[in-house]
Amino acid sequence: MPETSDQRALAVSLSAFDDESLARLLSERHVSASATWRDMFDAADALLDPASIARALPLLDRAEAEALVAATADGIPATGGIRDALRTRGLVGDDGRAYAAVAAVVRDAVPDGLAPTPTEPAPRASDDAAAAESAFTSAAALADVLLLTLDSPLGRIGSGSLGASERRRLVEAGATPTPEEADLLVGLGARTGLLGSTGRAWLVTAAGRAWLRLPTLERWATTARALRDALPRAYRTPAGGWMPQPTWAEATPFDPAGPERAARWMHRLRAWGLLDAHGAVPAWGRGLAEGGDVDTSALRDLLPPEVDKVYLQNDLTAIAPGPLAPHLDVRLRGMAARESRAQASSYRFSAATIGASITAGETADSLREFLSGISLTGLPQPLAYVIERTSAEHGRVRVTADTASGLTTVRTDDQTLRRAMEVDTSLRSVALSRSGDELITHVAADVVFWALTDARYPAVAVDEDGRPRTVERARMATTETPDSPDDVYAPLIARLRAGGEDSDAAWLERELDQAVRARALVDVTVRLPDGSARVFRLEATGLGGGRLRGRDRAADVERTLPLSHIDSVSPAS
């Protein structure tokens, strides 16, 4: 149990915290919002438990850790802003001295003191060309990951990592060269707000979808800013930039996972071209590293120029003679399968890919207009034929939601198609049944539409007036933000503050309760009616009804003392 003097000092300190600081402290210590604490003394008792203190230490940055070790080993109190930071974490008192329970945990954690900070190497010129290549490659690969995630969410395993099958899917699709790179890019997208999680899967966010339409340089700059802002606090400078990369591994000295986390963040910054292979910052990253904004002018000169035209060929392929502008690439990939990715990419059209684009909202006219506009070779006759034939066949199966009956209706003039859908086992999940010349089901129209599309039927979703409507398949990550610590801990904080309205009386009752539980021998100072004080040495035996009961050893009698008359209590010496 923590020393009572420390416990009381921390309780008084906690009472002076504002609600935001107190909620942040409870969150950092992983306190349950349903904790049954009655007052600040209960909170102080729990926060001075060694297990709770151990949860706070890994969060300290280098300067805070050094100050806490100095306060523990050398008795040097923390001062200034560092003292305030340690105090709001419940580790030192108002005087900057470590609580005894904290000092014991620190001594156990680092009996020989902290490892020294690595010496910074002499500055060296960055390899800008290699960093620029990494930036370009990673931006293109991350776009591929997002596009694949729009098609189908990326599954997560129980630990939160990307599933092995999903890593293989990204590698086989050509989005990443290795499973390790898949983890890197997904982590990078998650940290910068392009991917969001449902707990069981990664989904593209609205910001991620908008990012896909940006030019490459703007994609890179937007993510570079977000990546810098997402860096752990321990790596950041007061100006808002980041500290020299060699110091990151020891930036959180009490955190066993600190070196691994530092390596992961360095890998992300290297992949995004903000560090070169040796940790030097290239010209375009210096502004961010110093706390300012990114300067893309130097990077622009090293990136391959984007093109806005392609060669459409008779074999139903399209060849881009350079990196295709992102907004064109995204739309082209909605109507053709990309076969190779390099500075010159190739795409292949087929009836299936054209059909998928019409399903997503394209028309024969919009396809012809777009392809003719970006083609250096006109619209080849074989491709025009596939567009016309697919468009003519598409929509022979119409899916409508009947609001009056609540049913979904599937109509077609092709009796062969109707009979095929009626007996198709792959459509068993939507439970289609015959009703005259139609098929009906209680399953939602959008679900039926996608089931038919996946089974390769030429389906189109139409409204009640028969007009085609676009059905969005991609699931997007919700923009809901988790409850803030202020909201999570508001009821608990209100109860703690209510329980501490009379802190002296609460502390006295707490001391007496502990004495009764231990049947301890205590000296009780009682204020008598004439204003004088008298000390009784009692073996505490009971507490209730506003009175303390105990056996007076000296007089060998049982005494009952009103709590309102007790000024203080202390262990018998």
Image: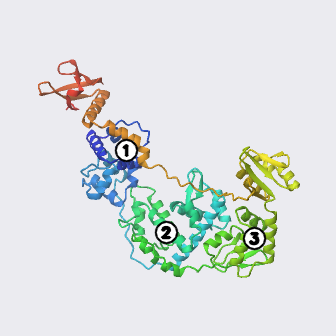
Label 3 crowd bin: few (<14), some (14–19), many (20+), radius 10 Å? many
Element marked by disc 3: loop
Mark pair 3, 2: CA separation: 35 Å
* Type of amino acid at the residue the image marks with label 3: Phe
Q: Is residue 375 left or right of residue 256?
A: right
Quadrant (top left, top right, bottom left, bottom right) of the C terminus: top left
Dots 3 and 1: beta carbons under 8 Å? no
Quarter holding residue 1:
top left
Residue wearing tag 2:
224
Task: Identify whether 473 is placed above or below 222.
Answer: above
Mark pair 3, 1: CA separation: 64 Å
* Type of amino acid at the residue the image marks with label 1: Pro
Q: Nearer the viewer, mark 1 or mark 2?
A: 2
Which is nearer the eye, 384 or 248? 384
Instruction: Work out whether mark 3 precedes mark 2 in sequence or the reverse, and give the earlier one.
Output: 2
Which residue of the protein is positioned furthest toward the front in this rendering?
Answer: 465
Label 2 crowd bin: few (<14), some (14–19), many (20+), radius 10 Å? many
Image x and y of residue 205, in percent: 57, 59
Which is nearer the eye, 415 or 268? 415
Please say whether residue 520 is visible from this viewpoint: yes
Residue wearing tag 3:
349
Element marked by disc 2: helix
